[in-house]
Amino acid sequence: MSITSEAELEGMRKISEAVGTTLRKMTEYAKPGMSTKELDEYGRTILEEYGAKSAPKLTYGFPGWTCISVNNEIAHGIPSETTILKEGDLVNIDVSAELDGFWADNGGSFVLGEDSQNLNQLVNASKDILHKALNNIKDGVRIADIGRLIETEARKRGLKVIKNLVGHGVGRSLHEAPHEIPCYYDRYNRGKFRKNSVIALETFISTNTSMATEKGDGWTYIAKDGSFVAQHEHTLVITDGKPIILTSSNGI
């Protein structure tokens, strides 16, 4: 969407605070021995406190309130009573929701407890690259150039990007134009970021693979080769200068 009034900006601020705070609190709540279903139910209670509705459930009938992916799962992991979190797991939580006709989206990866798999470097790279992208995004910048920045920064660290999962516009629905904000340089993408538009910008930084593969359950994307992938995502408003980070309450 494109912000045209203070009322619209305030609506986006409210839903973005809801999803951002839910993500932060779920990250803090996660403990070894807990099922991802229990963690998801905790997220549900926070969204309900805000009066917000789960976007993946509302839009797609997703079998969970939030998406929780563990280790070699990349995205859209289904919360389950049988998936038990362990010390050292790479966990990704993606929270998106609707409130009063406004939609926001954010996500983040973290290592649970002790970093036994040496993945904090990957997590920190994803965060750092997202911040670099945010510092370079403004009105008139080509979408392809932000993709090139993300891919170049990943390569500098000996890492790769996932090419078939992308950022997107958001605001009046979960997915809007621009429909593809990739993590790599796509020379055919001639779109530009426009002032007052709302987008969900995300990084998918990988230890090796460049493609996410559907697991077979209709939802979950995995790294078939056993790679680990860290994702971080903010909802923001494009301006003439630094963007307005609407989901800053997530602490990323």
Image (cartoon, helix red, strand yellow):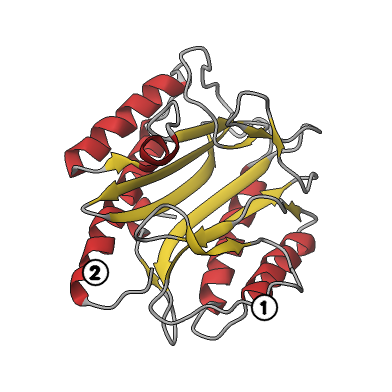
Type of residue at label 1?
Arg
Residue 66 position, x and y percent, is 41, 35
Image: 19 above or below 171: above
Q: Going 57% across and 31% down the picture, which residue do you hit?
A: 219
Secondary structure beneath label 1: loop
| Residue 54 appears in the figure | yes
Image: 90 above or below 34: below
8 relative to 243 in the view: left or right? left
Quadrant including the C terminus: bottom left
Q: Mark 2 sits on what residue? A: 8
Quadrant including the N terminus: bottom left
Q: Going 60% across and 28% down the picture, which residue do you hit?
A: 218
Occupied quadrant, residue 38: top left
Q: Mark 1 sits on what residue? A: 190
Q: Residues within 10 Å of mark 1 (few under 14, many from 20)?
A: few
Q: Nearer the viewer, residue 124 or 203?
A: 203
Residue 237 shows which numbered tag?
none
Secondary structure beneath label 2: helix
Occupied quadrant, residue 41: top left
